Image (cartoon, rainbow, N blue to C red):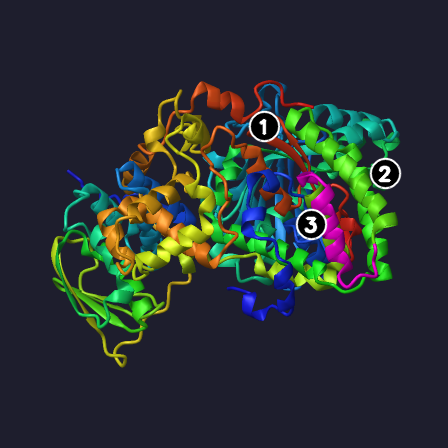
Amino acid sequence: MKHEVRREAELELSLSEITALSARAARGAGRSWGESEEVGEAACWLARAGQDWAGAVLEVLDAAEDGGDCALRVGIVLADTAALSVPIKTKLPMINSPFFLLPFAARLADQAGQRIRLDWADTQVVLAPGACPSITGSVGIAGPAQVTITPDPQDKTPSPDWPPTHRGTVLATQYARLMQFMMASTVPTSASSLAGAGAGGNDDD
Amino acid sequence: MSCEDLNPMPQARAFRRSPDEVMRLARMGCSHPTRLSFLRQLLLRMQAESWRFDRPVWEIDAKGVGYAVYRAIGPARTYSLVAFAHDLPPEARSDRVIATAWDATFTLFDGTPTPDDLDRLAANVPLQEAGRVSPRELSLSRANRSVRLFEHVVERLAKGLQPDPAMLLETGYLMRTTAVYGSGKFGAVDRSAIAQRPEMRAPFQAEMLSVWLTRAFTVDLVEHLARAKGGETAVRLASELKRGLGVGNSTGLGMAPFLIRHPILLNNWMLAREEALARVRAQFTVGAAQLAQLHSTLEAARENAALWTSAHDIQIAKLADLRASLNQIADHVAQGWDQTTPHPWDDLWRWGQDVLPLEGQEALLAAILEPHGALIDGLGDCMEADESAHFAINGAMPVGDLRAILKAQYGWALRPDYTARAQCARFWYVSEDKLEPRLGERHEEPGAERELPLDTGRQAAALWQALQEQPDDLPVAHVLLAAPEHRPAVRRAQITARHPFAEIRDNLISAEMLPIDILRCKLAFFGATRFDPRSDRWVRISLFQGAPFPDEMNGDCHEA
């Protein structure tokens, strides 16, 4: 029997579509609005860096939301306490989807005004303030893992430029799942709302 | 960026109105377009830079079906409106966002489209939301004919006659857009990718350019159909009649949340306008040219108010206020205004504050900005916003500081009792069918558990409560760790501390709240005229009425 390797269909989305879809999907998955907005921003950052933003978002949304191993929760604390946690040297607990920490750790680098390095399993990521992440090792979504964050000396590998694109790709199956999550944040339009929202009768004049 | 440090007139600050006065819905719902409005900025730039315009493609048949391309050629870049004209059966014509077919569909293309581009666009643009555009496109929009007027104009021109001026005045447009999407919607280019271009820096410039070129298309289409029908007998639309035609627009609730979800942008729009007013009030003299321009501006405003009609009770009352106010202002400027005082413009403004209703006060604002282009037009550069730069929450902020912000900026939010039925009567949500924002009745309809976070006042009050037992020196990050539901309110408060015009200072879920007030404010910043509410949540307006057409601008205009 002949086997055919078929590549899954990919869609291209603008960054604003990625931000809105991810935030609404997170809300549909039961996260608070504040956390959902963080998911949207994080997805946008990962997409700009050319990374698998949808895979990272889905991994976070599929995990238990209140666990101490939630990358979203840990990431938010990391970013919120950026100004409180200098000097930077942190050994985080075991975290699901450590890749999702990167946008939040980037804010830590911004706030500290210095390069930082994240290490987990065989992955090493260097984040310079405002710069695109420099990633070595596995880039796939692989958790849980223990992440350490340390300052990175200034004279190491230069950070790559941000890719000159304002788009992100998503696999059709990922898109369908994100849409499914997102739809859970919507409400069927009521008859009274429909009546008031626009013209009921003839629009011609 | 903040322009505050670059302000060449820091002395004007003393004349600024407070956010507590400006950011109330009752006043925002009386907003008038000014010379800082986005369509005015577009026209002023294109005139100053001598943009050229042409129409390299016109493939429209005798039934009005086909496509056309209009180009706007600037000093650095060219933008093309690609227009598709369709044969729409009357029963399919609807202005609602849920419609699926239109008389015409459009996109603004970045550059000059190739035949391949046009093929791709022809397969997607007519589908609107059901299609996809690409990073080469800046906007996606559609329009329906104002059937009665459209047919009348075609009939008359075909017979070699001009249309009835009264009918033109009554409707004011041949087509109305029912949605104009930009900023990355449906695959279009993200704003962040084009915001560095000088001509796109001001908000909504791509959308405004698209609508302005659409206006030219609507006139070309009626003239084309008249020629197809009348042959040699047909005439073109007289330029003085043409000038009075704008593009209509039907706008519903979908636009309202924008101002709430973009607090820094709202601040920058408001602050630019308020700084403009303050600068004018700080002037020491009234020049002859300024006085003459003020007179002509008031005259034009009175003519506009006379032609501006609405069947909506609230708007009828506002129009009566406006007409009476404009008469009062014109009389006062002609007779009562002492122009020899140290701050004559401020005196005029204060007189208006004392004697005019809100509608008249805001009309006076627009009128006195008009003769001061050199003084205020530069403020147009301050109306954009890099919102991502302000996204991060400062978790190190002590609770005492956050409390102080709430006390100083959110008094309006802390007063209502949100458990009272009328104070939480509404909830904003996203509709399942069109993914559009809607407003529900909390006590009568299901779905409130899926509410959008647009209940800004109630959230601020809940945050205030949550902070009550916390020590002043506790970092906000610790509060959020225990209570992440306060995140949006903390972010908004921190933004508002630095951007005092960021919040609409009213309860947005109250039974009293009128969405049309939010719409009017936003549409006035666009430059819209003839605001005509059809309910408390959707409106008709006109864009570019009275503005020049491409062939009336400074540069050349060629037809292919």
Is A106 on the left or on the right of A71, as rendered?
right
Tag 2 and tag 3, C-beta contact below 8 Å: no
Mark 1 touching mark 3, by CB under 8 A?
no
Kindly identify which chain the residue marked by label 2 belongs to: B
Query: As drawn, which residue projects farthest toward the bottom?
Result: A155
Above or below — where is B28 with respect to A49? above
Residue B277's place in the image compared with B160, above or below, is: below
Mark 2 Cα-neighbour bin, 10 Å: few <14, some 14–19, many ≥20:
few
Mark 2 secondary-structure assignment = loop
Mark 2 to mark 3: distance in Å?
Answer: 28 Å
Q: Is residue B12 left or right of residue A179?
A: right
In the picture of the structure, the residue carrying the numbered disc 3 is B34
The answer for how far apart the CA atoms under marks 1 and 2 are is: 29 Å
Image quarter (top left, top right, bottom left or bottom right) of the N terminus of chain A: top left
Q: Amino acid at mark 3?
A: Thr
Q: Mark 1 or mark 2: which comes first in sequence?
A: 1
Q: CA distance from mark 1 to mark 3?
A: 27 Å
Q: Identify the chain of the residue marked 1, using the numbered disc in the image.
A: B
Location of mark 2 (residue): B238
* Sequence-earlier tag: 2 or 3: 3
Can residue B107 be seen here? The reply is yes
B127 left or right of B444? right
Taking the magenta stretch, the answer to whether it contains residue B342 is: yes
In which quadrant of the rendered image does the C terminus of chain A lie?
A: top right
Q: Residue at x 71, y 58 (%)?
A: B281
- Name which residue lies at 47% across and 23% down: A193
Range drawn in magenta: B338-359
Mark 1, other Cα within 10 Å: few <14 / some 14–19 / many ≥20: many
Q: Tell which tag, 1 or 3, sits nearer the viewer.
A: 3
Magenta segment includes B327? no
Mark 3 lies on a secondary structure that is: loop
